[in-house]
Image (spheres, rainbow, N blue to C red):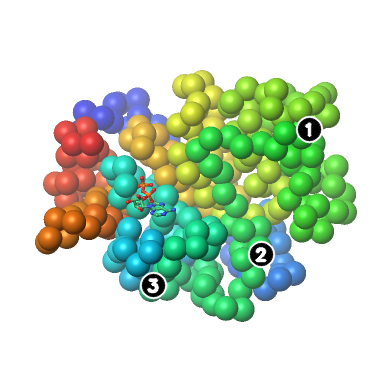
Amino acid sequence: MPESVTDEEHTEIERSRRTDEELLSRGSDRASLDVGGAARPREGYGTQAHIWQREKVFELSDVRISYAGVPAVRDVTMNIHKNAITALIGPSGCGKSTLLRSLNRMNDLIPTASLDGTVHYHGEDLYASTVDPVRVRQLIGMVFQKPNPFPKSIYENVAFGPKVLGMKDDLDERVQGALEGAALWDEVKDRLDSNALGMSGGQQQRLCIARALATDPDVILMDEPCSALDPISTGKIEDLMLELRESYSIVIVTHNMQQAARVSDATAFLIVELDEAGKQRTGRIVEYDETEKVFTNPSDSRTEDYVTGKVG
Ligand code: ADP
């Protein structure tokens, strides 16, 4: 076992794997991109299958994402599965965030960004011209590296998304449900009118998770969600991720190897390569497998060097 995975962490991987097997899978709640399609139900679990047998949420085929025509990441072919935490790891600049942002069309907001290849979401082409990007970002929420609450009350932060999307019925219940889902309700229920900027960093990040949950997402994308947090707040977010996995599919970018080993079910390791002229740097996946395999018995020596800390 590589030095970077302690016995305790290995036990934790085993524990979460067992929990995983005990989890119940939902069969027929395929999230539809059709505007007004059925929201994700929270009940009706069956027996949770091995990760690769679980329903595919995303199918990426030969994806290349470029900025101003220069590829940042290429040759990405991978499936991302339901009720799993999928981690993207690798050195800075290998395209982890770029790849993550392609999963909810956030790169559309960058004028120079373009995508080749296909990204299917529950079997539908995520980039089809008929798909509404607002609906996409409702179903596929995002939590960023730095907590970014609005300078408004805690309540208004969570209610904002539902209000914009016209989900105004039972708003108080929706806000409470989202705050409960983000393990924050008990800490804030008596001060919902307080300004969110007065919360601690860890609370702010859980508020951002609540904000994502408030619009009934199917997937939550997390871009280094703990990198600005202390270890205790990080632990709370990691525990929360494991809870959220029961109802959502999560994709996380992290530079923290222990975090990927502790929480994720599957891990993709990316590297950045120089072209033959030594000018262009492009990221690609060298290994994508079950997290335990990636951290304890990787197929590629470059993965091993990275996860054991020989190279960074
Ligand atoms: P990582 O998350 O692995 O650090 P990124 O996805 O942030 O990698 O970046 C991958 C490459 O794409 C880098 O070379 C970076 O400079 C480039 N890049 C990222 N965002 C932009 C952008 N908005 N415009 C131009 N280039 C970008």
Secondary element type, mark 3: strand
In percent of the image, x 18 and y 36: which residue is there?
Answer: 311
Front residue (pair 210, 132): 132
Q: CA distance from mark 1 to mark 2?
A: 25 Å
Q: CA distance from mark 3 to mark 1?
A: 41 Å
Secondary element type, mark 1: loop
x, y percent for residue 63: 36, 68
Three-letter amino acid code at the position of disc 2: Arg
In percent of the image, x 50 and y 59: which residue is there?
Answer: 110
In the image, residue 294 sits, relative to residue 135, either above or below, namely above
x, y percent for residue 167: 81, 56
Count the marks: 3
x, y percent for residue 211: 68, 43
Q: Name the residue carrying label 3.
A: 116
Secondary element type, mark 2: helix
Three-letter amino acid code at the position of disc 1: Ser
Q: Name the residue carrying label 1.
A: 153
Name the N-terminal-most of marks 1 and 2. 2
* Residue 135 image label: 2
- Disc 2 and disc 3 in contact, CB within 8 angstroms: no
Q: Residues within 10 Å of mark 2 (few under 14, many from 20)?
A: some
Three-letter amino acid code at the position of disc 3: Asp
In the image, residue 97 sits, relative to residue 242, either above or below, namely below
Q: In this orientation, does residue 180 appear?
A: no
Q: Residues within 10 Å of mark 1 (few under 14, many from 20)?
A: some
* Residue 203 image label: none
